[in-house]
């Protein structure tokens, strides 16, 4: 085989062509080389797992261990979800104008049926959207994840997403929704500070 064949990639093709001409297919060629080395796939996998600590994954020690790119993905997902929630209000929209003028086509039904729930829902959606945008901006400009400029917008955006979900459930009392939201904020605060 000439050196030019190795440089322009013809060498691999010649090797495969020669092995096919001799009646040996690629699977047999790979199996033969593994048998010659005395290593099978199961042993290779076991050895790799032992080197990596028994196959167990390590747990991140805390919020500051998260990479900015991971948090950026989370912030983008929260932004997308809160945007969707803000534009697709639970209950939908009126399709026609009311004869008595109580609503117009395109108005949210939730706003007319349960005004306080609607405004809590929208406030949580706006807070989540705004804080996730702030979080995204901070991460894109290189603010470290252990900074309060990243941790607090994360806390507000994530808990606001939870509040919008809880508020969209029309059968729960609003006071219960706010208590659950407060509990989620408390758990997230403890997790970020001490986790």
Image (tube, rainbow, N blue to C red):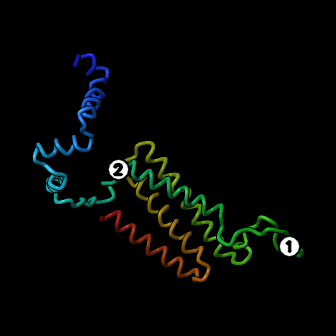
Task: Report which quarter residue 195 is drawn in.
Answer: bottom left
User: Which sits earlier in the primary sequence, circle 1 or circle 2?
Assistant: 2
> Residue 179: where, in percent of width, then height?
49, 79
Q: Nearer the viewer, residue 93 or 38?
A: 38
- Which part of the image, by quadrant, shows the N terminus? top left
Alpha carbon separation for disc pair 1 and 2: 52 Å
Q: Nearer the viewer, residue 57 or 169?
A: 57
Front in this rendered view, residue 119 or 53: 53
Relative vertical location of residue 59 with respect to residue 186 in this rendering, above or below: above
Query: What is the secondary structure assignment of the residue under circle 1?
Result: loop
Residue name at image x 71 percent, y 72 percent = 111
Instruction: Give the vertical position of 38 relative to 154 (above or below).
Output: above
Q: Position of residue 9 (x, y in %)?
A: 31, 24
Q: Residue at x 35, y 68 (%)?
A: 190
For disc 2, the marked residue is 67
Q: Report x, y in % for residue 69.
A: 40, 48
Task: Give residue 125's quadrant in the image.
Answer: bottom right
Q: Residues within 10 Å of mark 2 (few under 14, many from 20)?
A: few
Q: Position of residue 124 (x, y in %)?
A: 57, 66
Label count reads: 2
Residue for point 44% across, 42% down = 141
- Is residue 186 shown above or below 5? below
Residue 86, numbered circle: none
Please tell me which residue is depicted at 88% across the width and 76% down the height of the picture: 100
State left or right for residue 57 relative to residue 127: left
Q: Residue furthest right?
A: 99
**In the image, 179: left or right of 9?**
right
Q: Mark 1 sits on what residue?
A: 98
Looking at the rendered structure, the secondary structure element under dot 2 is: loop
- The quarter of the picture where residue 97 lies is bottom right
Judged left or right of residue 5, residue 75 is: right
């Amino acid at each position: 085989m000439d050196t030019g064949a190795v440089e322009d990639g013809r060498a691999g093709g010649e090797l495969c062509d020669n092995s096919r001409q001799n009646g040996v297919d690629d699977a047999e060629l790979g199996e033969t080389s593994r048998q010659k080395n005395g290593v099978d796939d199961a042993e290779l996998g076991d050895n790799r797992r032992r080197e990596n600590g028994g196959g167990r994954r390590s747990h991140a020690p805390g919020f500051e261990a998260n990479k900015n790119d991971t948090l950026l993905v989370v912030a983008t997902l929260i932004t997308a979800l809160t945007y969707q929630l803000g534009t697709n209000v639970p209950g939908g929209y009126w399709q026609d104008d009311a004869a008595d003028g109580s609503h117009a086509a395109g108005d949210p039904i939730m706003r007319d049926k349960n005004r306080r729930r609607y405004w809590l829902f929208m406030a949580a959606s706006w807070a989540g959207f705004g804080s996730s945008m702030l979080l995204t901006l901070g991460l894109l400009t290189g603010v470290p994840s252990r900074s309060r400029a990243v941790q607090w917008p994360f806390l507000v955006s994530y808990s606001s997403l939870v509040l919008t979900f809880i508020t969209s459930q029309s059968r729960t009392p609003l006071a219960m929704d706010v208590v659950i939201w407060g509990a989620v904020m408390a758990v997230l605060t403890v997790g970020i500070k001490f986790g």
